[in-house]
Amino acid sequence: SGLQPLPLYTFKIPAGFPNPAADHIEQDFSFDRLMDLRAPHIYVAKIDGDSMEGAKIFHDSLVVVDRSRKPSSGSIVIAALNNEPLCKILILQGDHVVLKSANPAYPPRHILEGEELSIWGVVRHGVTSFE
């Protein structure tokens, strides 16, 4: 698969990063195992806008999306509404579907009869860069 396992260091890192020593290596570490990634059902999407900031998904954030997961009410999903891609919280209320932002500045979007909604996957993880 071309993926290289990484070492997992088990010592505490209070404020800095001490010189790693081999006796602190507990096991090989795999992001695939940690995040329960099931290729080829996984993809990464870059988020545009601030509507999901309350869920700690910021503008230009990367999210890991799983197409094999069945979305449930409360799931954060990547979807297309009338062919427009978006990232929202899926709310299921009986036969009624609402797409909710995690930013109170944006009102919930109630899906109306005749509109086309397609769920592209459930957001499983966010990737944050500190640079």
Image (cartoon, grey):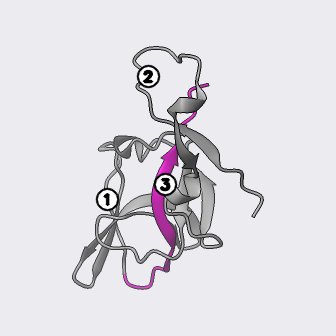
Q: Do the residues under discs 3 and 1 have CB atoms within 8 angstroms?
A: no
Q: Which residue is mark 2?
A: 13
> Of the residues under marks 1 and 2, which one precedes in the sequence?
2
Instruction: Work out whether 101 lies above or below 91.
Output: above
Report the residue that reaches farthest toward the front: 23
Q: Position of residue 92 (x, y in %)?
A: 27, 74
Q: Position of residue 28 (x, y in %)?
A: 58, 48
Magenta span has 94? no
Report the residue that reaches farthest toward the left: 94
Q: Which residue is mark 1?
A: 108
What is the secondary structure assignment of the residue under circle 2?
loop
- Residue type (three-letter) at the residue carrying disc 3: Leu
Q: Residue at x 42, y 46 (%)?
A: 51
Q: Please give left or right for residue 104 compared with residue 52 in the image.
A: left
Instruction: Work out whether 123 lies above or below 112.
Output: above
Q: Quarter of the image for the N terminus: give it.
A: bottom right
> Of the residues under marks 2 and 3, which one precedes in the sequence?
2
Callout 2 crowding tier (Cα within 10 Å): few <14, some 14–19, many ≥20: few
Q: Nearer the viewer, residue 20 or 129?
A: 20
Q: Nearer the viewer, residue 107 or 45?
A: 45
Q: Which residue is mark 3?
A: 34
Q: Quadrant of residue 108?
A: bottom left
- For the record, the magenta segment spans 113-131
- The span from disc 2 to disc 3 (Cα, nearest Å) is 20 Å
- Residue type (three-letter) at the residue carrying disc 2: Ile
